[in-house]
Each structure stands twice: as C-alpha cells, then as structure tokens.
Amino acid sequence: MKNYQLIPNVGWHDFSHNNELKDHLYAVFMPLVNDGNWSYTNFTSDTGSFEDELGNSVLLEFENDFEENVDSIISLNVSIATAKKSEISFLEATLIKTANKFGLYKEKSSDAI
C-alpha cells in the first residue's frame, strides 16, 4: 500500500477550495461504484474507501478543523493499494491530476508491502 499526504502549495490554512476538493475526489471514484465494478464504504464523515474485488483500493482520510470551521481541511491522506500493475497507473494518475488541479503536492509518507 502506498500512502500519500496531499498538501496545498499555499498551506491548508490559506486553501480556499476545501469543498471543491472533497467533491472532486468523490466524483472521480464514484463512477467506478456506479458502474458496479467497485464498492464504496463511508466509515466516518472524514473517510471514504473505494475498492474492487481484486484488491485494488483507495482510502481517503480528511482531517477537518472542527474548532474553527467544519469545512476546513487540515490534513488529507490518500492510501492506494493495487492488485495488479495496470491499476497503479490509473489510481496514481488520478492522484497526480487532482494534485495539479488544486495546487497540491504529494508527500509520499510511506510504502507498505
């Protein structure tokens, strides 16, 4: 599993596209669920897991600043697990496109085998 922490170039405190980012991430993966190829699980209001029967998955973890603003993200982690190499390019390409669209950089936090 590869784990990435996404960070805005301006920092989370000055990032003004919180809801747009959340909506975009879910919009990218929900068509896979709607096609019946993947399933979606929402464990908490700050997490979402997309996975297929082959073992490919994407886990989104948002940490929000509830003291100041419910919609204010202070941390975003994305974990990607792939069962075959062909899925790596799609999942990581999606992550890269999202990072570019919202001015985020990805800090690779860890790789677990």
Image (cartoon, helix red, strand yellow):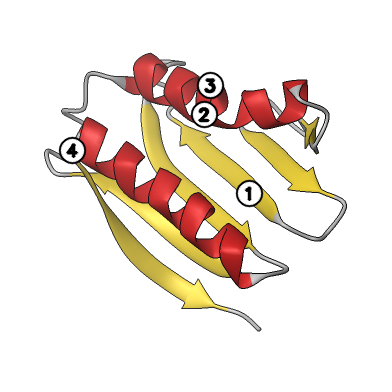
Instruction: Report the residue that reaches farthest toward the right.
Output: 53
The x, y position of residue 52, in whole percent, is 80, 47
> Is the residue 70 above or below the residue 109 in the image?
above
Q: Which residue is mark 1?
A: 58
Q: Position of residue 26 (x, y in %)?
A: 56, 25
Tag 4 residue: 103
On the image, the x and y values in percent for residue 23 come to 47, 18
Q: CA distance from mark 1 to mark 4?
A: 21 Å
Q: Which residue is mark 3?
A: 27
CB atoms at circles 3 and 2 under 8 Å apart?
Answer: yes
Identified at 18% across, 38% down, the residue is: 103
- Which residue is identified by label 2? 28
Instruction: Work out whether mark 3 precedes mark 4 in sequence or the reverse, and give the earlier one.
Output: 3
Q: Earlier in the sequence, mark 1 or mark 4?
A: 1
First in sequence: mark 1 vs mark 3? 3
Q: Quadrant of residue 41?
A: top right
Which of discs 2 and 4 lies nearer the camera? The answer is 2
